């Protein structure tokens, strides 16, 4: 067993991993118990990989990074982090190379890794500098891009061949400093592919959900349903949804590294798009509070400025060019090893995570409708629909 896996399992067994991730809880969740990913298939009992990889994670201490570290360690790989220093506090038993994506890559000089995982959000300069520093230092470069890289999500089914944004299609001047998110991701993909031809793995996740997600873009639903009562639900329940549990995403990332699989992969689930009603009823099945759903059509919601996605998280009705948004054909991804844990697992782990957050954070939701707004729209709907 590799020293890092041994350390990781020892820390897990003694509870020192806290949230199941590092020796200290993620910032802002100091009150949290052992909740992160404690349910489901992603557990320290996962089998060790036949071949040990040296993995460099650029970042690694935000939301997704810690799960990448966990997925890699569980499989017996060795992990090095590169960030401005947060890795030392979160993963004291791992090597952190301190540097800065804006220009300090000195610590990487003369080193080699089998795989690099790059979590940079939207900065083409960061990608240029990192690939320059690492193109001769790795066999595989995995970039966490996004479904937002697609210029057109009207195709049904969606596949990775759909066109991504260019400066021309996005109508953005080439010298513009801050690029829109989707164009930034598409350009970063191209930079990685140019710098490491045949060695780049591009991942295009949709909404990444589960324990640790600080955006509340999925958490809203389990928490709202757990509160009970009459719940405003969007559309008629048939709109498809495809999102991904962070643990499925990072297990897939590590699988692609183990198999040295390059190419472009969409990362959403489940394989067959789930109707929105199934999502909400599936979440309700893991709660015990009395809760009912009142489905309100999109045009009525629009009159009250209840916007898809922002106020009704995870919901994007398949109209106005969004027909393929949640209708991905995931055949290549499943063949490459993408798996999906149950919605019950995701919902339960998300609730555990939420209830372990400090009270003030639990009361300051970052997505979804406030209780007052929900009551107001429901009252208007009942008045209008008799
Ligand atoms: N959440 C979603 O639904 C979703 C969907 C699609 C795609 N994505 C993508 O998922 C990726 C994952 O993001 P994450 O925040 O979870 O990643 P992460 O790797 O867990 O966290 C971000 C890391 O960046 C490091 N960092 C920040 N500024 C830095 C700098 N100047 N130099 C060096 N390191 C720096 C931070 O550490 P220090 O502060 O110590 O430097 C931290 O470790 C992003 O690319 C995002 O676009 C997310």
Image (cartoon, rainbow, N blue to C red):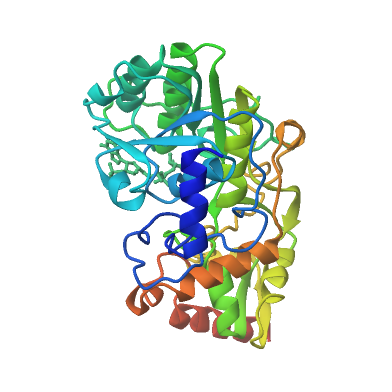
What percent of the width, then of the height, locates residue 17?
44, 59
Q: Is residue 128 above or below residue 60?
A: above
Q: Is residue 75 above or below residue 342?
A: above
Q: Residue at x 44, y 48 (%)?
A: 66
Q: Residue at x 71, y 45 (%)?
A: 339
| Residue 80, image quadrant | top left
299 lies left or right of 82? right
167 lies left or right of 256? left
Q: Residue at x 36, y 24 (%)?
A: 127
What percent of the width, then of the height, locates residue 212?
46, 59
> Looking at this view, is 113 or 219 the one in front?
113
Quarter placement of the N terminus: top right
Q: Is residue 153 above or below residue 112?
A: below
Q: Is residue 276 above or below residue 269?
A: below
Residue 32 visible in the displayed image: yes
What percent of the width, then of the height, locates residue 368?
48, 68
Q: Residue at x 56, y 33 (%)?
A: 203
What percent of the width, then of the height, locates residue 379?
56, 85
Residue 68 visible in the displayed image: no
> Looking at this view, is 177 or 191 the one in front?
191
Quadrant holding ligand 1? Answer: top left
């Amino acid at each position: 067993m590799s020293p890092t896996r041994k350390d990781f399992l020892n820390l897990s067994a003694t509870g020192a991993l806290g949230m199941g991730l590092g020796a200290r809880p993620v910032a802002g969740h100091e009150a949290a118990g052992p909740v992160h990913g404690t349910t489901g298939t992603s557990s320290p009992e996962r089998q060790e990989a036949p071949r040990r990889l040296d993995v460099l994670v650029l970042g690694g201490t935000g939301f997704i990074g810690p799960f990448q570290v966990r997925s890699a360690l569980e499989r017996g790989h060795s992990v090095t982090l590169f960030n401005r220093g947060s890795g030392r506090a979160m993963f004291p038993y791992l090597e952190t190379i301190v540097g800065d994506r804006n220009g300090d890559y000195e610590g990487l000089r003369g080193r080699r890794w089998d795989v690099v995982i790059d979590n940079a959000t939207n900065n083409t300069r960061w990608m240029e500098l990192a690939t320059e520093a690492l193109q001769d230092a790795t066999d595989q470069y995995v970039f966490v891009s996004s479904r937002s890289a697609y210029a057109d999500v009207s195709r049904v089914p969606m596949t990775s061949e759909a066109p991504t944004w260019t400066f021309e299609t996005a109508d953005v001047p080439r010298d513009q400093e801050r690029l829109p998110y989707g164009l930034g991701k598409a350009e970063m993909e191209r930079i990685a592919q140019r710098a490491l031809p045949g060695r780049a793995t591009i991942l295009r996740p949709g909404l990444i959900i589960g324990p640790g997600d600080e955006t509340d873009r999925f958490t809203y639903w389990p928490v709202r349903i757990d509160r009970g009562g009459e719940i405003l639900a969007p559309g008629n329940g048939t709109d498809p949804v495809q999102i991904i549990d962070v643990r499925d995403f990072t297990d897939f990332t590590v699988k692609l590294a183990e198999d040295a699989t390059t190419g472009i992969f969409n990362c959403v689930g489940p394989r067959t798009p789930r109707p929105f009603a199934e999502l909400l009823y599936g979440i309700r099945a893991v709660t015990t509070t009395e809760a009912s759903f009142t489905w309100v059509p999109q045009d009525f919601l629009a009159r009250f400025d209840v916007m898809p996605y922002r106020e009704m998280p995870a919901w994007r009705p398949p109209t106005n060019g969004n027909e393929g948004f949640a209708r991905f054909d995931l055949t290549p991804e499943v063949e490459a090893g993408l798996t999906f844990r149950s919605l019950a697992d995701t919902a339960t782990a998300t609730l555990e995570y939420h209830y372990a957050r400090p009270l003030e954070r639990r009361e300051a939701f970052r997505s979804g409708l406030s209780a007052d707004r929900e009551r107001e729209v429901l009252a208007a709907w009942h008045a209008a629909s008799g």
